Amino acid sequence: METAGKPNQDWKADRYAQHAHFVPALGAPVLELLKPQAGERILDLGCGDGVLTEKLAATGAVVVGVDAAADMIAAARRRGLDARVMEGGKLTFAGEFDAVFSNAALHWMKQDRDAVIAGVHRALKPGGRFVAEMGGHGCVAGITVAIIAVLERHGIKDGAATIPWYFPTVDDYRARLERGGFKVEYIELIPRPTPLPTNMAGWIELFAQPFLNRLPAEQRAGAVEEVVEMLRPVLCDEQGRWTGDYIRLRFAAHRQ
Ligand SMILES: C[S@@+](CC[C@H](N)C(=O)[O-])C[C@H]1O[C@@H](n2cnc3c(N)ncnc32)[C@H](O)[C@@H]1O
């Protein structure tokens, strides 16, 4: 099943838990930046399977999670959370949240980036805060170049057109937030080399499907191997441990 309205994404909670639970585990600094207070109403945008949403709720905040992927929302509901299937670019809330929080999701909302900011603005009470972390400019650059090079070997000359992520610079995202009616208190790019628990092949299987979908099914496993071997000299250490070349963009802003 494909993610609603996003034919290039196919998020499944079991695969996410297997390959990517480092994502919510590394969300602690952005939670600290949010400083959730008991009783506040908080929206978790792109909540996934709800691991961080649950942490938010444990602070006593009243949390709603939204995500475009029905399978992820089903997993979040199994945690007892108020979680709803909703597109980030089509948020339906109006003036009801003290804060909107997001971890590792905004860069997937590539086509809707300004509609997302507009919907967050509408969802917030006046003065409400928007605190988030997403991939930032240069994130997974090495991995992306290797995938595009392997696609080219397989006859796909426009692999870059398939890049599914939007990794903005500080200047770009600050300007978008300001145009969208936010005052930005803090925004920073943070290099964060990230250990990959299921190695590079696991990472590619989970996060790089849009690229692999360009190839006939029978070529995909071989292509993953080629990417892995291309990256081994730079992202795998002597002990065989893989590190992703992550760069995060973290910010705190409030609705003017
Ligand atoms: C890497 S996961 C992050 C999940 C969670 N925030 C966490 O920290 O574990 C990215 C999530 O963004 C969601 N997503 C991607 N595009 C979306 C969109 N346009 N609207 C809403 N959710 C979206 C995906 O379904 C996925 O659950």
Image (cartoon, helix red, strand yellow):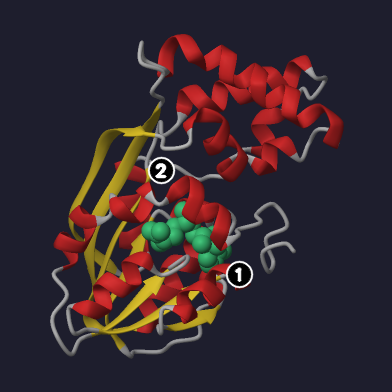
Q: Tell me residue 248's x, y (percent).
A: 32, 42
In the displayed structure image, the side of residue 135 where residue 38 appears, left or right: left
**Which residue is drawn at the image coordinates 25% and 74% (left, top)?**
56
Answer few, some or many: residues within 10 Å of disc 2's Cα (few below 14, many 20 plus, some between 14 and 19).
some
Could one spot residue 47 in this view of the protein?
yes
Between 97 and 66, the one lying in front of the other is: 66
Q: Is residue 98 above or below residue 73?
A: below
**Which residue is drawn at the image coordinates 22% and 78% (left, top)?**
58
Q: CA distance from mark 1 to mark 2?
A: 28 Å
* Nearer mark to the viewer, of 1 and 2: 1
Q: Quadrant of the C terminus?
A: bottom left
The label shown at residue 25 is none
Looking at this rendering, what residue extends furthest in the front direction? 239
**Residue type, label 2:** Pro
**Which residue is drawn at the image coordinates 24% and 38% (left, top)?**
190
Q: Tell me residue 113's x, y (percent).
A: 50, 58
In the displayed structure image, the side of residue 195 where residue 67 appears, left or right: right
**Residue type, label 1:** Asp
Q: Say which element carries label 1.
A: helix
Q: Say which element carries label 2.
A: loop
Q: Is residue 224 above or below residue 96?
A: above
Q: Quadrant of the N terminus?
A: bottom right
Q: Tell me residue 37's x, y (percent).
A: 13, 80
Residue with the mark numbered 1? 71
Q: Is residue 46 above or below residue 119?
A: above
Q: Tell me residue 255's x, y (percent).
A: 26, 74
The label shown at residue 168 is 2
Q: Is residue 53 above or below residue 112?
A: below
